[in-house]
Image: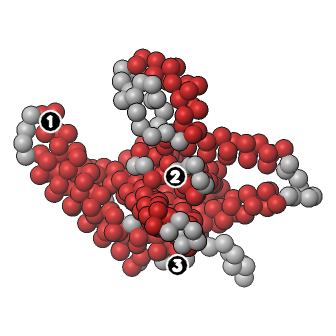
């Protein structure tokens, strides 16, 4: 019978992270949604100035909100596996 | 003319003319041509020089048989970051330890220099955390490309090819948001820490600010840890096979 690997593969699904790693992961959740919104808005404003339009900032904000929520859901799902 | 720290004054006295010429060559007009070097930049230079001297000192005293206190301290830092990256990234994490350790030490000393009278924390100015976050961003993206080659781009295209045109802008915004998130967290915490210490110091200059200095040290350590930990998490996302 082969001896068990003392250092399990960290990339395998279902691995448990330490409390601090999980705490840091969750601490970014408070920032990621507003940060994504601001980044989307900035990209939209830049595109508006470049293309001489007036509505792309709204599309940028929506894109930022969607990106922020996807990142949130992805973080939750990663730990729920 | 902005208020300058003594070290900034020395740097401006020595290098104002060449720095202004260099900026003008790059078509950048400095706000104060007589003092183009800001306090935050001079503090960064000081931390860089301090770390360089520390590393040279450490290199000259390295010993396998009789390691000194400095070697023990740095081995502790290296071991801690190595253990943490192995926990998050996995077996092949050794190659990333050097970058993560240097990033941690730079941010830590930038945070802590603010408690020394006559200096201020460069990380309490948004441009410095932004620079650190951009370094982390470029590093993890480049490692992603190095590890996965052109197939790393699949990380940005989502699980299904039909969704790729929708997922690409979302992923780009999501990755850029990480830079902003790292920047704001470090800047806001250090700025708030500095302000709290300054306010209590101006109210009661003797004794009372000491607990707040302790708080500043705690916040400095914690924010350094979180910054490096999140960089490691992003690095793991970039070099992992799953997407």
Q: Chain of mark 3?
A: A
Q: Chain of mark 1?
A: A
Residue at 63% x, 62% y is B81
Instruction: Give the residue furthest to the left.
Output: A54
Where residue B120 sits: x, y (%)?
Answer: 52, 50
Where residue B96 sits: x, y (%)?
Answer: 60, 52
- The mark found on residue B121 in the picture is 2
Is residue B67 something one can see in this rendering?
yes
In space, the residues marked 3 and 2 are separated at their CA atoms by 29 Å
The reply to the same-chain question for discs 3 and 1 is yes
Residue at 35% x, 74% y is A76
Where residue B162 sits: x, y (%)?
Answer: 21, 54
How dense is the environment of label 3, judged by Cα within 10 Å: few (below 14), some, or many (20 and up)? few
What residue sits right under mark 1 in the picture? A49
What residue sits right under mark 3 in the picture? A19
Where residue B70 sits: x, y (%)?
Answer: 79, 57
Total marks shown come to 3
Instruction: Give the residue furthest to the right.
Output: B65
How dense is the environment of label 2, judged by Cα within 10 Å: few (below 14), some, or many (20 and up)? many
Q: Which comes before the other along the chain, label 3 or label 1?
A: 3
Mark 3 element type: helix
The reply to the same-chain question for discs 3 and 2 is no
């Amino acid at each position: 019978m082969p001896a068990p690997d003392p250092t399990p593969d960290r990339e395998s699904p279902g691995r448990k992270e330490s409390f601090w790693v999980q705490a840091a992961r969750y601490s970014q959740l408070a920032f990621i949604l507003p940060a994504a919104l601001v980044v989307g808005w900035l990209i939209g404003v830049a595109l508006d100035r470049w293309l001489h339009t007036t509505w792309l900032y709204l599309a940028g904000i929506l894109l930022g909100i969607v990106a922020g929520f996807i990142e949130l859901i992805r973080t939750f799902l990663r730990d729920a596996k | 003319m902005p208020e300058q720290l003594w070290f900034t004054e020395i740097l401006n006295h020595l290098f104002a003319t060449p720095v202004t010429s260099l900026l003008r060559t790059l078509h950048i007009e400095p706000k104060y041509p007589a003092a183009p070097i800001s306090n935050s930049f001079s503090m960064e230079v000081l931390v860089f020089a301090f770390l360089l001297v520390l590393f040279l000192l450490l290199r000259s005293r390295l010993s396998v048989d009789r390691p000194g206190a400095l070697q023990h301290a740095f081995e502790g830092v290296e071991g801690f970051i190595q253990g943490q990256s192995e926990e998050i990234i996995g077996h092949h994490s050794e190659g990333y330890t050097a970058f993560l350790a240097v990033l941690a030490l730079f941010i830590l000393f930038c945070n802590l220099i603010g408690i020394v009278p006559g200096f201020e924390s460069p990380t309490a100015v948004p441009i410095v955390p932004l620079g650190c976050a951009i370094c982390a961003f470029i590093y993890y993206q480049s490692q992603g490309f190095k590890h996965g080659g052109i197939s790393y781009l699949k990380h940005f295209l989502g699980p299904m090819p039909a969704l790729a045109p929708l997922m690409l802008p979302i992923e780009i915004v999501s990755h850029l948001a990480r830079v902003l998130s790292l920047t704001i967290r470090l800047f806001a915490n250090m700025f708030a820490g500095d302000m709290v210490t300054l306010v209590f110091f101006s109210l009661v200059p003797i004794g009372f600010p000491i607990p707040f200095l302790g708080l500043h040290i705690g916040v400095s350590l914690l924010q350094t840890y979180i910054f490096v930990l999140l960089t490691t998490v992003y690095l793991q996302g970039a070099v992992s096979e799953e997407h």
